[in-house]
Image (tube, grey):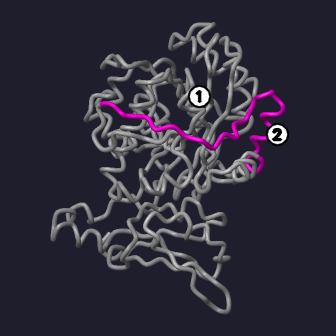
Amino acid sequence: MSENKTNTFEPVAVSRLTEYDEDKILACLMEEADNIGIADDAYKGKRVVIKPNLVAPTKPDGAATTNPIFLKAVVSFLRAHGAENILLAESPGGLFTETALRLNYKTCGILDAAASCDLPLSYDTSSKNVNAKNAKACRAFSVITPISQADVIVDLCRLKSHSLTKMSAAVKNFFGVVPGIQKFEMHSAYPTLPVFAEMLVDLADMLCRRHEILAICDGIVGMEGNGPTGGDPRKIGAVLMSQDPFCLDLAAETIVGFENTVSTTNAAKARGLCPSSVKDLDIRGTDPREIALSDFREPDATRKTFLGSLSTLFGGKLADFFAPHPLVNKKKCMGCGVCQNSCPRRAIDMIEHAGKKRAAIRHADCIRCFCCQELCPIHVIDIRQNPITKLLH
């Protein structure tokens, strides 16, 4: 992609793959690259930065973060296409410090994987301010320095449900280029889902205009339910590749049965950044409609209820009253304070409960961004439906 991006949409390669076998993943990636027209020397002489999904320090088998085996196959794929200067860079949720990065890389299995394939990991915690042309919600972003300096960004995402945006794939994964706790500030500045989704599309569009993009989505095993960290692993059996993150997400939402309900994809459609329907995508390989799942569980927070009919009543206040919200399981909370530190509106207090400090959410101040649920290290923050809503569902 480039500054001269037009409405000529890039093709999307979709393949079936059901296991984390490095050789099979590499073969799949090589075939997909050939299908969408990536030249053998496409990355020769270019600075290539892999942007994984390392949202929180979790074990690889939890399906919340980039799979180490998949990562190694991607590195081999890039080298087979001429890449010599490759770096992995990420800004996980929470603090953006060298110590936090080291913990994240180690816990997620990335440290060992990188060592085995001689992949440098970034510990640079600086950032650059970048203007976003044609933006609708946000005209400037702070972007971690390695990403801002890349010629090619490899958007290595994992196909997951997401309690705020419903789905996390290529577009949502780019939010990790915003450094550290500035992501919480972005949640606060864009507190409603429609405007937050527009901001995410602004960010992805800005990156597409400034850099060459290769989006690769690991859907071999994804996450369903209360993702992006608190859901359950789900075998999906798909790998997707495109030079356009918006088109890739359109195919991905179809595979998990979220077609036309993902906020970021709908915003992209409205801007003409991807086709309005998956049937208009240039699919190379397996048609995503052929492998679409009918029972992929969406997050509790996004499940459709009668709330949609209330969204315009009393200025939306009635819908707001009935909307799902995060709730701390005080019996299991260990009082670590991660949720308190991650709350954009400082709506979480640490209160004595049974002789120990426990988190308590002030729901009057909560904007339901679900950062607390996303970053809770032991997943004890649930999504609670209003009891009246349950009766009327």
Q: Nearer the viewer, residue 158 or 293?
A: 158
Write down the residue under mark 2: 112
Q: Quadrant of residue 367?
A: bottom left
**Real-space CA distance between mark 2 and mark 1, rounded to the nearest whole angstrom:** 27 Å
Q: Do we see residue 60 in this rendering?
A: no
> On the rendered structure, is 171 left or right of 337?
left
Q: Nearer the viewer, residue 11 or 367?
A: 367
Segment colored magenta: 106-133
x, y percent for residue 103: 74, 52
Indicate the secondary structure of the residue bearing disc 1.
strand
Write down the residue under mark 1: 16
x, y percent for residue 88: 67, 33
The N terminus sits in image quarter: top left
> Where is 57 relative to 211, above or below?
below
Indicate the secondary structure of the residue bearing disc 2.
helix
Do the residues bearing badges 2 and 1 touch, measured as CB atoms within 8 Å?
no
Q: Nearer the viewer, residue 308 or 105?
A: 105
Q: Is residue 327 magenta?
A: no
Q: Residue at the location (48% across, 50% down)?
A: 295
Tell me which amino acid carries mark 1: Arg
> Where is 207 relative to 198, above or below?
above
Tell me the number on the disc at residue 266.
none
Q: Residue at the location (67% across, 92% down)?
A: 355
Number of labelled discs? Answer: 2
**Label 2 Cα neighbours within 10 Å, binned few <14 / some 14-19 / many ≥20:** some
Q: Do we see residue 48 in this rendering?
A: yes
Tell me which amino acid carries mark 2: Asp
Furthest residue toward top: 40
The C terminus sits in image quarter: bottom left
